[in-house]
Image (cartoon, helix red, strand yellow):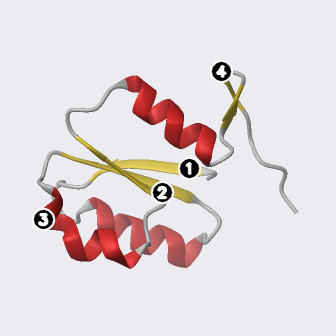
């Protein structure tokens, strides 16, 4: 996949653990983690740099668009896919 969007707080495994597993299998996949937790609760995960982005709830759709634009997933309000090698 080009992009994984996940919540942090989930049963079985958290979003960071999912990101870690995803990056191991597919390093080029971009990962965006959303959470309602305070930044201090995920400080170690934030510092690791494993996730390509974090959104802290509440957030607006413009925050999602900004992430997509910054990670070459959207251009001129249209979703694009990077070229595969």
Q: Residue at x 52, y 72 (%)?
A: 23
Q: Do residues under tags 2 and 1 come within 8 Å of each other at their CB atoms?
A: yes
Q: Secondary structure at mark 1?
A: strand
Q: Residue 9: horizontal and vertical position, in percent?
A: 17, 54
- The numbered mark, 4 or 2, whose residue comes first in the sequence reads 2
Q: Mark 3 or mark 4, which has the lower sequence index? A: 3
Q: Which residue is mark 4?
A: 77
Q: In screen coordinates, is 25 left or right of 20?
A: right
Query: Looking at the picture, how far across and down is residue 80, in whole percent?
Result: 73, 35
Residue 38 percent location from the top left of the image: 12, 54
Q: Which residue is mark 3?
A: 40
Along the line of sight, the residue nearer the viewer: 25 or 80: 80
Q: Residue at x 24, y 55 (%)?
A: 8
Residue on which disc 1 sits = 3
Question: CA gap, disc 3 to disc 2?
Answer: 20 Å
Q: Which residue is mark 2?
A: 31
Q: Quadrant of residue 44?
A: bottom left
Q: Earlier in the sequence, mark 4 or mark 1?
A: 1
Report the mark closest to the observer, 3 or 2: 3
Q: Give how far apart the Cα atoms at labels 4 and 1 are.
A: 17 Å
Choose the circle earlier in sequence order: 3 or 1.
Answer: 1
């Amino acid at each position: 996949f080009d992009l994984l969007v996940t919540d942090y707080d989930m049963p079985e495994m958290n979003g960071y653990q999912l990101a870690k597993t995803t990056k191991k299998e597919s390093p080029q996949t971009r990962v965006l983690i959303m959470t309602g937790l305070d930044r201090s609760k995920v400080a170690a995960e934030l510092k690791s740099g494993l996730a390509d982005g974090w959104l802290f709830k509440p957030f607006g759709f413009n925050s999602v668009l900004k992430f997509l634009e910054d990670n070459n997933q959207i251009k001129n309000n249209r979703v694009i896919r990077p070229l595969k090698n």
